Image: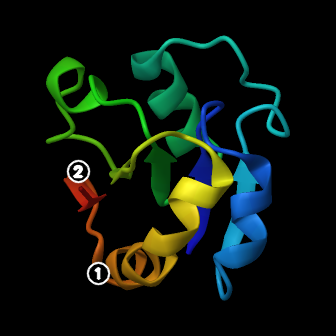
């Protein structure tokens, strides 16, 4: 599974998503793009899942016609220490995510 981590997700999280090819928005030179454009560019680059902690994305984007899914991590903050307890659930959701859906893990 090709996974793109949003700018607001610590890059060190990618080493915990074992079994998946993970890249960050800055690594893909997509920093500063707005969510709609970012998702379109991520799809074009062949990503399957976009991981974010952005609480508003689920209300801002209609993913029905998209080939990418969005995984929202609900945690106390976007700090790595607050995200790490959710890694097992993130890994499960990555395996079952489908194009065009938004799924949440955490709080």
> Where's residue 69, x and y in %?
33, 53
Q: Can you identify the residue that label 2 sits on?
A: 100
Q: Say which residue appears at 77% left-offset and 50% top-offset.
A: 11
| Residues packed near mark 1 inside 10 Å, few (<14), some (14 to 19) or many (20 plus) | few
Query: Residue 48 at x, y = what percent?
Result: 48, 60
Q: Look at discs 1 and 2 and give the one toward the viewer.
A: 1
Rendered position, 59 above or below 87: above
Q: Nearer the viewer, residue 79 or 70?
A: 79
> Percent position (x, y) of residue 40?
47, 30
Residue nearer the viewer, 58 or 45: 58
Residue 47 visible here: no
User: Which element is circle 2 on?
Assistant: loop
* Quarter assignment of residue 98: bottom left
Kind of element beneath mark 1? helix
Q: Is residue 2 visible?
A: yes
Q: Quadrant of residue 53?
A: top left
Nearest the camera: 106 or 50?
A: 106
Viewer-nearest residue: 63 or 50:
50
Q: Which residue is mark 1?
A: 96
**Residue drawn at x 48%, y 39% as measured from the top left:** 77
Mark 1–mark 2 Cα distance, whole angstroms, equals 12 Å
What residue sits 53% from the left and 55% below the top? 82
Please identify the quadrant where the C terminus is shown. bottom left
Badge 2: how crowded within 10 Å, few (<14), some, or many (20+)?
Answer: some
Left or right position of 105 against 90: left
Can you say which quadrant of the picture contains the N terminus? bottom right
Position above or below: 6 against 80 = above
Is 82 displayed left or right of 106 in the figure? Answer: right
Q: Position of residue 26 (x, y in %)?
A: 80, 31
């Amino acid at each position: 599974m090709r996974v793109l981590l949003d700018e607001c997700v610590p890059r060190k999280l990618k080493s915990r998503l074992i079994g998946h090819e993970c890249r960050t928005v800055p690594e893909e030179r997509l920093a500063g793009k707005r969510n709609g454009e970012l998702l379109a560019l991520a799809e074009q680059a062949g990503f399957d899942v976009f991981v974010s902690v952005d609480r508003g994305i689920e209300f801002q984007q209609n993913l029905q016609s998209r080939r990418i899914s969005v995984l929202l991590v609900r945690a106390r903050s976007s700090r790595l220490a607050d995200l790490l307890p959710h890694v097992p659930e993130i890994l499960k959701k990555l395996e079952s995510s489908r194009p065009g859906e938004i799924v949440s893990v955490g709080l």
